[in-house]
Amino acid sequence: MPINVTDQAKHLSCILLTGANSNQKANQAHLIVVLDDIVFSANVAESAKSQDLSGILGGAGTYAVLGARLFAAEDTKRVGWVVHTGSDFSTKVREEVDSWNIYTRYISTPERLTTRAKNTYKGELRGFEFLNPKKQVTHDMLDDSLLKARVFHVISNPKRLINLVHGILERIAKGGRDYPHEPDFVWEPMEHSCSPENLPLFLDAMSLAHTFSPNEDEFAKLFGASLSAGEELSADFLREKCELLLQGRAFKVVAVRLGARGVFVAETADKDTASPLICRHFPSYPQAASGYVEGKSRRIQDGIHIPKVVDVTGGGNTFLGAYCMSLVNQPQISNCTIPQSASIAGSVAASFAIEQIGMPKLTMDKEGNEHCEFTYDSKLQHLRYSVAKDSANIDFKGNEESVIGRLETYVQGIGLILRGFAKA
């Protein structure tokens, strides 16, 4: 049965907003969808030459939607976003977005071109630049369905987060009974705003967010540290600074994304707990699938596909999209809190994003099962991973290439048990 707008409003779980860029005013946000032009230089692998790509879907918000979509199970309309379409927004791209079967609010802006960026690859180096102006996104662009989301993912500086959260909550308050709950906000900071001078403002913004999730470099810069190539933050530094951020704050989370090393998750503990913080490091999916636990390598699980890193672009955004959705769907993993389980789901989602350039193609087989197909690496050309429709009842044995199968592989790799999903 088709889902109408009213039904969508009841089921929407996650909306993803993109925040201000370094060359914008503090109260602005750039477009959630970016069309990417990808250019490969002559020193890229032979298989990649002459495969320059133009106008493919990209952008931080798009990758976050990918992560949320992977863990939406059968409730794909619970993922929502705003898409500004410029005069050059093609039918092909729109059909690709529509194929994801999520809740999309298109806003037509025919007086401008769709935001476009150029990605240039030279070996392992990636160059990036925007080719035209970005479009502002504000809370008043959200319709009633989007306002009823359970979780918002926001990429912004702290001042914009404060303004955006207040604007959304004010609109919800005016709606009364039509909005039965206040949403949670998962905040990904803009790198340029991460500095010791802005720390007081960051603390103010964190009081409004459920989860604060910088990457390792952003976290270091917030405290005046800088990392040289290959340098890592110590566990003691991460714990000490997370304790500073979370001190006196109830039910808050800091999830520092560590790239290939996974994620460090710190959350405030119950009053009766001896330590004020619960801190835990979770490895990346390739590490977990290889049996990497607490810094020690265990036996590689037989027959497990270890992802080949093709492009790390969007890995962190994909992580946070799946994290947001998993705060709602709540994977039940032994000895894990909800934020910890959501972090594991985020790591699994990121492992798919880094195996290709651009978005996977969503297809459906004769039995009605969804699959995502890789489109870039010739060695992965025929690799498909299925998107489970009912993750609460799926048989966890077997197909490692499914999203849930890969989640099970991760959980087993670190010695835990996946029991299903709670779906709060």
Image (tube, grey):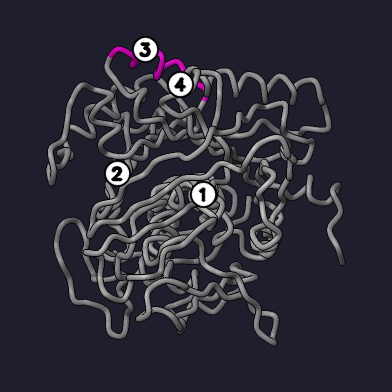
Does the CB distance between marks 4 and 3 fall below 8 Å?
Answer: no
CA–CA distance in space, label 1 to label 3: 28 Å
Residue 395, above or below 346: below
| Helix, strand or loop for disc 3 | helix
Name the residue carrying label 2: 264
Q: Position of residue 377 (x, y in %)?
A: 37, 74
Name the residue carrying label 1: 64
Q: Hey, what amino acid is under mark 3?
A: Pro
CA–CA distance in space, label 4 to label 2: 21 Å
Does the CB distance between marks 4 and 2 fall below 8 Å?
Answer: no
Q: Quadrant of the N terminus?
A: bottom right
Disc 4 or disc 2, which is closer to the eye?
4
Residue at screen point 34% across, 21% down = 247
Q: Is residue 105 left or right of residue 310?
A: right
Q: How dense is the environment of label 3, judged by Cα within 10 Å: few (below 14), some, or many (20 and up)? A: few
Name the residue carrying label 4: 158
Name the residue carrying label 3: 200
